[in-house]
Image (cartoon, coloured by chain):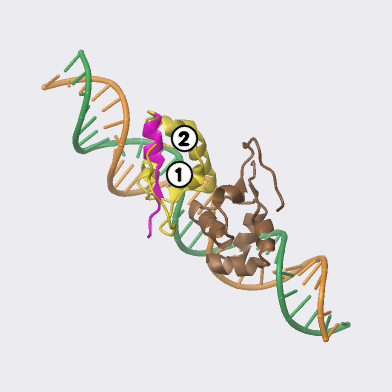
Chain colours: A brown, B yellow, C green, D orange
Amino acid sequence: MDLMQTRIREFRAKRGMTQAELADRVGVRRETIVFLESGRYNPSLRLAHRVAKELGTTIDALFSFGDEDDYVVREE
Amino acid sequence: MDLMQTRIREFRAKRGMTQAELADRVGVRRETIVFLESGRYNPSLRLAHRVAKELGTTIDALFSFGDEDDYVVREE
DNA sequence: AACATATGTTATATTTATCTCACACAAACT
DNA sequence: AGTTTGTGTGAGATAAATATAACATATGTT
């Protein structure tokens, strides 16, 4: 099935934001965030964008697929 | 309804690639590319990623939503 | 121990993306 | 004029995202 990686949880934690809070601000159900964080589904581009925006980052920074040469979770 | 902007056509043209070609490489139907280029639907993140990759760019460079401060189509 | 809060799960329903097929149109070429 | 090539459109079918609701678990707090 080839799931994707996401750093949503990492970014969300950095902001001290709860799943429910994020879901709320983004306008989806909390369960949707759960599924997103575990990579179990493939959001629409628009949803990905809203999430990235709420977390103060970009889509490309937030999600990654198996095909990148250089995906690393860097701490800062 | 609030459509999104995309530079797919621009990038595709730059590469001299046809809609059918792109569809093919990306693994979708040509009609899907037509709809994407006209912003009439909201691809899955994975599809957006595949398209960006085939066009040698990133998702964030390829798509934009009404909420950016600074979206410009720049020529290079 | 009881309670509250944050997270995870499972099943079903609804909405939307994408497929499929068929046709239409314009431009370029023979 | 006819043919090819690239692009656009529309309707119906299928697959996948998201909603909804209900329950489960873990952790922290009193």
Q: Position of residue B41 (x, y in %)?
A: 41, 50
Query: At 56% from the left edge and 56% from the top edge, which residue is drawn?
Result: A52
User: Going by the image, does C13 lie left or right of B4?
Assistant: right
Residue A60 at least partly seen:
yes
Q: Quadrant of the N terminus of chain A?
A: top right
- Which residue is located at x 40 percent, y 40 percent? B8
Measured Cα–Cα span from mark 1 to mark 2: 9 Å
Which amino acid does the dot numbered 2 rest on? Leu
Q: Judge whether D7 appears above or below A62 on screen.
A: above
In-front residue for pair B72/A45: B72
Up-down relation of residue A9 to residue A63 (above or below): below
Residue B55, label in figure: 2
Q: Quadrant of residue B73?
A: top left
SS class of the residue under badge 1? Answer: helix
**Res. B19 in view:** no
Asked if marks 1 and 2 touch (Cβ < 8 Å), the reply is yes
Position of residue A2 measured from the top left corner of the image (x, y, whole percent): 64, 41
Residue receiving disc 1:
B62
Which is more N-terminal, label 2 or label 1?
2
Whole-percent x and y of residue B1? Answer: 37, 60
| Crowding at mark 1 (Cα within 10 Å: few <14, some 14-19, many 20+) | many
- Circle 2 crowding by C-alpha within 10 Å: few under 14, some 14–19, many from 20: many
Disc 1: host chain: B
Chain for mark 2?
B
